[in-house]
Image (cartoon, helix red, strand yellow):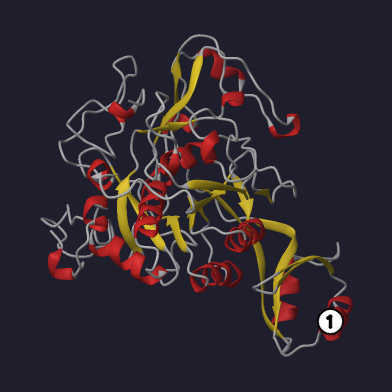
Amino acid sequence: MLMVILILTTAISFQYPRKEKTREFPPKFFGKRLPELNNGRPLVSTGVSYAPDQILVKFKPSLPAQAVSATLSAYRTKKMKRIPRINVYQLKLPEDVTVEEMIYVMSQNPDIEYAEPNYKAYIATNDTFFKYQYALQNTGQRVAPPSIPGAPTGVQAADTRATKAWEETKGDEQVLIAVIDTGVDLNHPDIKNKIFSSGQDFVNDDSDATDDNGHGTWVAGIAAAEANNSEGIAGVAWNCRVLPVKTMDEEGTGFYSWIIEGIRWAVDNGADVINMSLGGDVPSQSLESAVQYAFQKDVIVVAAAGNDSDTVLYPGAYDVYCLAVAATDASDEVPGWSNAGPEVDVAAPGVWIVSLFPEYLTPSGFLPYIWGDGTSASTPHVAGLAALIKSIKPWLTVSEIMTVIRYSADDVNSAEYPGKDEFMGYGRINMEKALVPIKITTSSRQ
């Protein structure tokens, strides 16, 4: 979900914390001085897909455990796991039965609430590079060094007012932002002091959420990279900490079951905010139940709208339970690839965004930082804002924080689409307005 340009510098030593979780760049990568991944385009969907031998099933609460076991046996399915809290079973099918056939058969059973495929989702990017972070402070500057071709110049004040917001708070270290993604570089110098724990990996089923793709590290840096450390960039929520949750593999895809487990685990392990710069094309009752669980536990969920020039992805489309985020550029315009729809709540910068990249995936001669595009980058700007609000006003409920973020946004496209619209929602976020000690109402929006 991002275009990538790494920053050339002196030689970098490679570190491989876990060999089985690393991968090399394609050979063509080393032949370019300023390489791009995905041909410089935000990552988009490659079509609906799901596990060919798995389904997700929820039995009615009235069915006893013994009856559940008997039912699974009758269908010749094998229980891979039961996802707690939302009580969804991940089942492996017999070899001679297709997903479609089993779902149809189970849909006829009055003891089964629903059965659905296990769909795949995809990833939706005094500090050295702060002067290029137009999203935080836009003075009309160029958004990347002159050595990088194609970088535009910003428009003054087309930003999120982050520097003004930091006068109110830079975050509380007790506030946790769970980054549900490809993992995080746990030892990156610009975020290692902000990592709460090694997290959880639902792809490899262990407790080491090391990033083997790069996307999750890029996202985590936008939300909470360390500031004033003479290193790299500044994150939106300076003092808040990151809880890494790996639900996407090295190719940037992951099954809904991994994401569902990741949401549940993050909530149960103290997350205050959940960032999901990812999404799938297909609705899922199991996924909706997981997001609802987070909402009911007063955890703010922020999700990417997507980059397909299409409708809002799931879980972002579950409007009651989470904030769906569209993208803007350095001129406060919405890029054509940013997904739209009535579920879009707000927008945030998502074009030419600089952030972290794993050191052990960085080729020799490049700094571990990248520029990228996508609603993947827009989302952690909003998640960081949610963490700042939670830090300074911990008594607010998740619904109240979502309301503050929505109604404090700047309606920057009001000339064409006054009020809430399907492209920016309520507008591009304004962190200063969201944090000032006044009552936010619809009439106070600019």
Q: In this view, which residue lies farthest toward the left? A: 415
Q: Image point 74% across, 86% down: which residue?
A: 109
Which corner quadrant of the image does residue 372 belong to?
top left
Q: Is residue 294 above or below residue 330?
A: below
Q: In this view, which residue lies farthest toward the top? A: 10
* Closer to us: 258 or 51: 258
Q: Quadrant of the C terminus?
A: bottom left
Asked whether, in this view, residue 162 is left or right of residue 265, the answer is: left
Q: Is residue 380 above or below residue 358?
A: below
User: Where residue 340 sits: x, y (%)?
Assistant: 34, 58
Q: Can residue 73 be seen at all in this image of the molecule?
A: yes
Q: Image point 53% across, 67% down: which residue?
A: 294
User: Where residue 288 sits: x, y (%)?
Assistant: 54, 70
User: Where residue 232 sits: x, y (%)?
Assistant: 41, 26
Tag 1 secondary structure: helix
How many numbered tags mark residues here? 1
What residue is disc 1 on? 71
Q: Is residue 3 above or below residue 419?
A: above
* Closer to us: 47 or 303: 303
Q: Give the residue type at disc 1.
A: Thr
Q: Residues within 10 Å of mark 1 (few under 14, many from 20)?
A: some
Asked whether, in this view, residue 446 is left or right of residue 134, the answer is: left
User: Where residue 51 sits: x, y (%)?
Assistant: 70, 57
Q: Image point 57% across, 18% down: which residue?
A: 363
Q: Image point 51% across, 49% down: which residue?
A: 45
Q: Can residue 334 be seen at all in this image of the molecule?
A: no
Which corner quadrant of the image does residue 104 belong to?
bottom right
* Closer to us: 298 or 374: 298
* Closer to us: 216 or 286: 216
